[in-house]
Image (tube, rainbow, N blue to C red):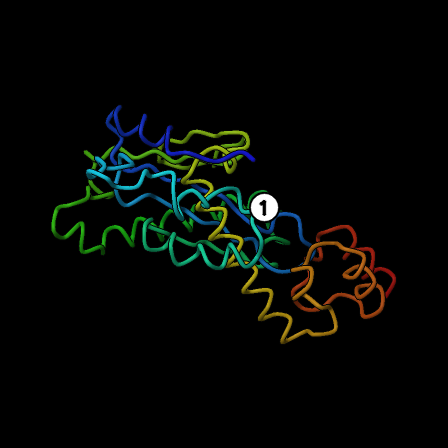
Amino acid sequence: MIKSTFQLENKLSSEGYEIVIGIDEAGRGPLAGPVVACAASLKNLPHPPAPSPGGRGWGEGQFDLVRDSKTLSEKQREKLYDFICENFHVGIGICDHETIDRINILEASFLAMKKATTSLMRGISNSQLLISNQIPNPKSQNTRLIVLLDGNKKIPNFSIEQKAIVNGDKYIKSISAASIIAKVTRDRIMLEMHEKYPEYQFDRHKGYGTKLHMDSLQKYGPCAIHRKSFAPVRKSLLKG
C-alpha cells in the first residue's frame, strides 16, 4: 500500500514557503448532495521536528494512517478526523446541489476549494499561534504560500500559487489529510439527508449511482437534493 509522506511539504518549507496547503474534494461523482472540499495545512513545518532521544519516529502512530481516504474504512476515517483537526489547520468549503446544477460540477468543485481556502486562512488568522507570533500571517504580503491540489487541474482565477499533482491524495500527506476531512464531512451530511429522505437510503451509498440508488430513483423519482443536471436524474425527470 502506498503511504503518503511530508517529503514535498518539507522541500517547499526549505525553499521558503511558510504555509503549504493541501486541497482535495469529495462528492464530484454522486447524483445527489453537495460537493465538499477541504484545505489542510500542517501546523508545524518542517515535519517531523527534531526527534527527542529515544523518541518514536514520525512514521509511527496516527500520522502514518493519514493516507488517501479511499484506502480507509469509514470507521478509520472517523477516528482520524479529530487527529487531523488537532495537527492541521483545516478549512471546509461546500457547494450544494443547486450550485452544481447552475454552474456545473467542475466549477462547483473549484468554488468549494476556494471557499475551503478562505475558511482555512480565516482560521489561521484567528489562531492563538498567530497571535503569539509562532506561525506566519497568511494575509501578509511577505508570507509565501502554496496550494497543492489533487489532480491535473489548477483552480482558475485564484491568486495563490498552485501545484497540481496527479494522485496527490496518495503521495502528499497534506492532500491525504484534506481528502479524509472532505470525505467525512460529506458523509455526515448525507447521513443527515438520509433522515430527511429515508426512501433513498443515502446512508448506504451517500448519493453515488449504485444499483440500490438507481432503483430508488426509478421508483420514487428525484428528491430535492438530487442533481438535476446529471444524466440519470434528468432521465428520471423526463420519465415522470
Vertical side of 232 occupied by 47: above or below: above
Q: Identify which residue, 16 or 64, lies in the foreground.
A: 64
Can you tell which quarter of the image residue 33 is in?
bottom right
**In-image side of 74 versus 198 (left or right):** left
The residue indicated by pointer 1 is: 70
Q: Residue 22: x and y, percent?
A: 41, 40
Label 1 crowd (10 A; few <14 / some 14-19 / many >=20) = some
**In-image side of 132 versus 96 (left or right):** left
Residue at the image point whose x is 52% and y is 53% from the top: 36
Q: Residue 168: x and y, percent?
A: 50, 33
Q: Point out the image quarter for the C terminus.
A: bottom right
Vertical side of 101 occupied by 167: above or below: above
**In-image side of 133 versus 184 (left or right):** left
Q: Residue 134: x and y, percent?
A: 15, 45
Q: Identify which residue, 119 or 185, lies in the foreground.
A: 185
SS of the residue under disc 1: helix
Q: Residue 53: x and y, percent?
A: 19, 38
Residue at the image point whose x is 79% and y is 61% from the top: 212
Vertical side of 90 occupied by 1: above or below: above
Q: Which amino acid type is shown beneath numbered disc 1?
A: Lys
Vertical side of 205 occupied by 176: above or below: above
